[in-house]
Image (cartoon, grey):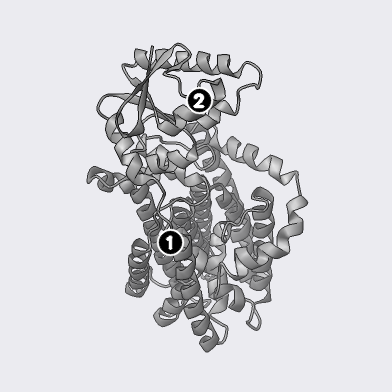
Amino acid sequence: MRGAPDRVGTGAAVDAAVAAGFLVLAVLLGQHGFYHVDGQGLVLGLARAEVHHDRHPLFLPIARVLAAPLLALGVSPFRCLTLVSALGTACGLFALGRAAARLAVPARERAVLLLAIAACPSVLFFATVVEFHGLFLAFAALAWRAAVGLERWLAQPDGSAVEAGRRRGRVLGAGAVLGVATAVAAMVHGFGQLLIVVLPCWVVARRGRDWRGALAPLAVACATHVALGLAVSVASGGAGGRQLGYFAPFLADLAPVRELAAGLVDEWLLAFLPLSLTCFLVAGRARERLVLGLAVAGYLVLTWILTPGLSERGAYLHPLVFPAAVLALASPRRLLLVLVAAGLALGVLRVRSHDAPVAGVGSMQAVVAVAEERPSFLLLASSAEEDPLLMVRPALPYLRVAEFLATMPAGGRAEAVHALLARLSSDQAGLDRRLLATRAALEALQAATGEVGSERLGALRVEVRRAGVVELRP
């Protein structure tokens, strides 16, 4: 384990085979509905060619590049993004296999390691939905590959003075590469900021008594991470600052930490079976186990602070699968393989139990057909109509009625709704677009203004079109 770094290409076929098999499984299990609320925004961003996300600025640009061939073939933005999740996770598995090869893990052992990671229910789940975490795993894995590369260079003997000088240069270069990798991962998903803490701790733990030699390259890594993060933040309109601004209010409230015990079961023990039950069942390597244990605890606390009372199925702990898997390889092999099978079965069960087609897609297709006869702006009742629209035609401009009705004062609501609709109608006319509404949206508006059953909404006439669609005209 402490010899020269393996050649990068050694045994890559094994890693590629496991990754390819996982990709096929993830594509076959690709889900047909959304998970929580981030997916809707990502589908809209891809459909409307948006290039930045407030807290995860590199996700959409990378996803757009990967999805471009599929979009050109007419694949829906929703399905493109589930495929991006599958591809990102598969690439992450391959990169983790390459990292394990640099640790001199033999090909057969790497196959077990990668199968143990792939079998984790959380890893499989987020490879099948529209979310950040599948693609993020690929970049977190590259950061681990960079950390392993740095640790391997640190393990080399100095040799002659000339060789020692060259080695120091390469070690500092490896530190810079690590900083670039963690910064890019952090811009794909904000939780990647934790990698610049976890990975240096892991490198120090691996170095043992020789840990002081790691300080200079790790300082370079941290400086590079900060510099590149700031550069990307400035280029994307201050996204890095919005990451901090988003996290800060949650960090000020530690009440959800009381729920940490419940989170330990759902976010770690079940989400990362078999790794969660085997990574600590090894003799020795106390420093690595301590770093992993502290990292798991830290990630769980932050997960519970940021998403109190909400199960995230282990989404935020994905970067920890590699050190857990490396430790798990030293656990009893039969137990590990039995738990791999159990984890995979649980993972498939969790995907299938969550997967449910979005309701109302058929009727929304009829609504979209009317809206696309001429340029149109569509009023929807609520998110119950938004989800099927995002599945069918996310590029169609729309507004949820429930969203702006919730902002209207109780007194004078009818007048406020009439004024807003008049302004909206005028704006759309200026863009040469019709103002359309679904039947449910019309009923919500009429209930708010007290004009139920009327053929008018304030100064606008209500004209019925096909598929329950109405047009609001001056």
Residue underneath mark 2:
445
Give the SS element for disc 1.
helix
Residue drawn where x is 41% and y is 31% of the image: 439
- Report x, y in % for residue 184: 48, 48
Residue drawn where x is 56% and y is 74% of the image: 275
Q: Earlier in the sequence, mark 2 or mark 1?
A: 1
Estimate how packed mark 2 is, as few (under 14), some (14 to 19) or many (20 or more) residues with alpha carbons within 10 Å: many
What amino acid type should be assigned to the residue bearing mark 2?
Leu
Q: Quadrant for residue 396, please give it.
A: top left
Q: Quadrant for residue 204, please give it.
A: bottom right
The residue sitting at the left extreme is: 73
- Report x, y in % for residue 318: 54, 61
Residue underneath mark 1:
92
- Report x, y in % for residue 66: 33, 48
The answer to whether one can see residue 386 in this image is yes
Q: Nearer the viewer, mark 2 or mark 1?
A: 2
Estimate how packed mark 1 is, as few (under 14), some (14 to 19) or many (20 or more) residues with alpha carbons within 10 Å: many
Residue drawn where x is 49% and y is 83% of the image: 337
- Report whether 331 appears left or right of 71: right
User: Separation of disc 2 and disc 1 at Cα?
Assistant: 48 Å
Front position in the image: 462 or 233 = 462
Residue drawn where x is 31% and y is 45% of the image: 76
Give the SS element for disc 2.
helix
